[in-house]
């Protein structure tokens, strides 16, 4: 249907809005399906921490203490002295590392409080068995930690649907209405957006505010690229202030949005040339005020330590400065992590990956799929080429978009840490470029064919991805298996930096708890280089010898350690020995959920990149249905909602000494 968009000029307005409504409804259905994807077991660590902090955000006992960093329940950097929440353990009166913006946190809490207010009358008239009634309206009577997760996930999904609508408005303004409809449709079926909309994390909120900011930057411009009037108009001024407001909200969601100051400065120059510096100052002041109001403790909490080293500039020495800002401390810490300046265990997965290329590869394989991915990055190249060849001052809206997309991609793509979600703030613009490029293809039938192919294959991929949420989470069914087959008191081993089984849950109406079993962690990933030594190996082998069961929850560890033999000369040998059965552990249970459609499944290869041969039970699982192996995937794409679980039982009962003989001593 959308392949006939070039004839859009003959459509009536109600038909256009009919298309928009269908696209938004489809986007909402894809994003709201499966918000209970883990039965609210909090398997996403970032979401888990944000929600944990959110349970302490509440109205202060006295407003005098509302802005006291050590007492205020509004402060995300400090556990309030009287913090409590039913059903969970909450720390009190100590610092906490909150590496996220205030805005999504506060929005999630406000949405939950609003739902708590309106849910009694709504729940009384809606079917009690609806997921909306049970989870969002809390008809099930869940504790705050669980209910807040349900509401915040629904809110995240709705924000991402809002991004789809903003993309339509932005593309329509910059190019034309057909491009707006196609770009919105492409974003609606974008798999990375669909997945991230299921998590209460900062990135979808950041992306919404980024697109809103850029939309208001280009709004006062005509399609020719110049302001609507040579003189400043009320509309132009309001648009600039709103753009600045959304820039402030974007920075308040995630610090990387500071790059929006580049297109904001360009917007001021294009629309207010006569008093450029004055209006730029106004825009920056509006942005800063918005940030300060929505992130107050970024300014108020100065109880941390952030020291700028002293430096010499010729004859002048700049002294060291202690900023004491908890917000800056988190920004500096995160900046060091993403650039590889701090050696964090869970970021070693990106060692050896190529800057820029790994980001693009992951989008082509998984985030967008090959058809949409090629159109998106091809569209970006087309937009850059078009701007460089034809720019004459009339393409200012296109230049403003590029002033955000290119610096952000050039900076983010250079990071050592390459979580796929880092590209989300520019993905909506890539959809716009893809749509614009496709609709500028010469040849009516070629154009229709390409548009249809990209939409069709991407939609099928999106449907297959959403189908995984119709399957139970592997860690939940694995927990059930443990409770049914493993006697209480057994020693269950897990791997450090990964989750552990079983999860606490209700079974046949009775609570079953993880504490029924003994637990120990294997530290293969934690110690590296000189710490990957005989002492570490002996400790882990002793635990293996004593263990009854072993859970491999995901590829968090075996996807990294065997791939880095120079850093893990001894530990890197462990997983293949385990998978081969040489250590006396036999795989007794395997569970996975994969994107699937009409019986065909898509598999992200966890074993090829680290050079491992998986256990036979994994091969049997994959052979049960037609399965396409699409190659390696960023761990963050699979580990939360589609992990591969393998449970091993210690049937061989080898001693630590017997297991040690299997390791190559020359490797250390």
Image (cartoon, rainbow, N blue to C red):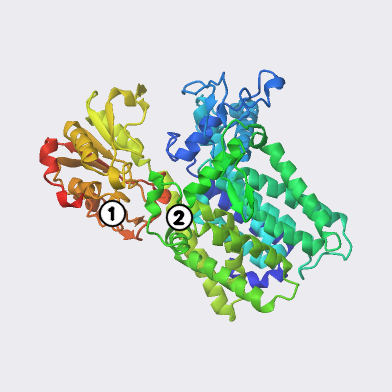
* For residue 553, above or below residue 633: above
Can residue 135 be seen here? The reply is no
Q: Splitting the image into 4 quarters, where does residue 121 fall? A: top right
Q: Which mark is drawn over residue 219?
A: none
* Residue at 88% in and 66% down: 230
Left or right: residue 592 versus residue 256 is left
Q: Which residue is mark 1?
A: 566
Is residue 398 found left or right of 535 in the rendered image? right
Question: Compared to 561, does 14 lie above or below?
Answer: below
Q: CA distance from mark 2 to mark 1?
A: 18 Å
Give the quadrant of residue 227. Answer: bottom right
Q: Residue furthest front?
A: 315
**Mark 2 = which residue?**
416
Is there any visible trace of residue 201 in the rendered image? yes
Outermost residue to the bottom = 443
Where residue 394 appears, as percent x and y from the top left, is 75, 72
The percent position of residue 568, horizontal first and vertical second, equals: 27, 49
Nearer the observer, 464 or 274:
274
């Amino acid at each position: 249907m959308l392949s006939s968009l070039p004839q859009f000029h003959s459509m009536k307005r109600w038909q256009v809005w009919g298309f928009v409504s269908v696209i938004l409804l489809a986007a909402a259905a894809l994003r709201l399906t499966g918000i209970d994807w883990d039965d609210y077991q909090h398997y996403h660590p970032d979401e888990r921490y944000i929600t944990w902090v959110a349970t302490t955000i509440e109205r202060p006992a006295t407003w005098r203490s509302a802005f006291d960093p050590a007492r205020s329940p509004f402060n995300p950097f400090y556990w309030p002295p009287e913090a409590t929440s039913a059903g969970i353990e909450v720390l009190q009166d100590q610092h906490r590392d909150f590496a996220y913006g205030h805005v999504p946190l506060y929005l999630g809490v406000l949405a939950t409080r609003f739902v708590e207010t309106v849910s009694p009358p709504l729940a009384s008239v809606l079917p009690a068995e609806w997921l909306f009634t049970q989870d969002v309206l809390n008809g099930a009577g869940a504790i705050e930690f669980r209910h807040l997760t349900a509401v915040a996930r629904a809110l995240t999904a709705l924000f991402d649907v809002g991004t789809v609508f903003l993309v339509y408005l932005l593309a329509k303004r910059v190019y034309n209405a057909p491009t707006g409809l196609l770009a919105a449709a492409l974003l609606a079926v974008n798999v990375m957006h669909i997945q991230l909309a299921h998590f209460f994390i900062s990135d979808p909120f950041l992306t919404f505010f980024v697109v809103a900011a850029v939309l208001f930057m280009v709004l006062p411009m005509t399609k020719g690229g110049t302001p609507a009037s040579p003189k400043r108009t009320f509309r132009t001024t309001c648009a600039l202030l709103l753009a600045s407001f959304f820039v402030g909200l974007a920075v308040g969601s995630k610090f990387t949005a500071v790059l929006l100051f580049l297109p904001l400065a360009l917007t001021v120059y294009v629309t207010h040339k006569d008093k450029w510096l004055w209006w730029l100052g106004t825009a920056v002041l509006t942005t800063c005020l918005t940030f300060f109001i929505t992130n107050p403790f970024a300014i108020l909490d100065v109880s941390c330590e952030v020291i700028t080293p002293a430096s010499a500039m010729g004859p002048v020495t700049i002294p060291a400065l202690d900023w004491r800002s908890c917000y800056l401390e988190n920004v500096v810490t995160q900046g060091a992590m993403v650039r590889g300046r701090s050696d964090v265990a869970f970021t070693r997965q990106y060692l050896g990956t190529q800057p820029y290329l790994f980001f693009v590869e992951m989008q082509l394989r998984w985030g967008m799929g090959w058809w949409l991915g090629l159109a998106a990055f091809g569209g970006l190249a087309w937009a850059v080429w078009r701007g460089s060849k034809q720019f004459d001052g009339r393409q200012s809206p296109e230049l403003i978009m590029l002033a955000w997309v290119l610096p952000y991609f050039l900076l983010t793509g250079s990071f050592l840490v390459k979580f796929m979600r880092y590209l989300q703030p520019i993905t909506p613009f890539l959809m716009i470029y893809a749509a614009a490029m496709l609709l500028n293809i010469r040849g009516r039938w070629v154009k229709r064919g390409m548009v249809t192919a990209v939409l069709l294959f991407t939609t099928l991929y999106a449907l297959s991805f959403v189908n995984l949420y119709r399957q139970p989470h592997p860690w939940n069914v694995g927990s059930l298996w443990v409770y049914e087959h493993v006697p209480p008191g057994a020693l269950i081993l897990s791997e450090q930096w990964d989750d552990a089984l079983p999860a606490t849950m209700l079974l046949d109406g009775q609570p079953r708890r993880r504490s029924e079993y003994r637990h120990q962690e294997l530290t293969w990933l934690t110690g590296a280089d000189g710490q990957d030594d005989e002492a570490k190996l002996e400790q882990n082998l002793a635990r293996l010898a004593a263990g009854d069961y072993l859970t491999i929850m995901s590829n968090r560890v075996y996807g990294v350690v065997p791939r880095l033999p120079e850093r893990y000369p001894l530990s890197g040998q462990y997983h293949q020995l385990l998978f081969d059965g040489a250590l006396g552990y036999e795989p007794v249970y395997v569970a996975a959920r994969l994107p699937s459609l009409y019986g065909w499944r898509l598999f992200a290869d966890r074993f090829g990149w680290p050079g491992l041969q998986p256990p036979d039970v994994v091969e049997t699982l994959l052979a049960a249905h037609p399965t396409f192996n699409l190659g390696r995937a960023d761990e963050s794409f699979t580990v939360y909602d589609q992990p591969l679980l393998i449970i091993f039982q210690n049937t061989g009962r080898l001693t630590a000494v017997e297991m040690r003989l299997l390791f190559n001593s020359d490797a250390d």
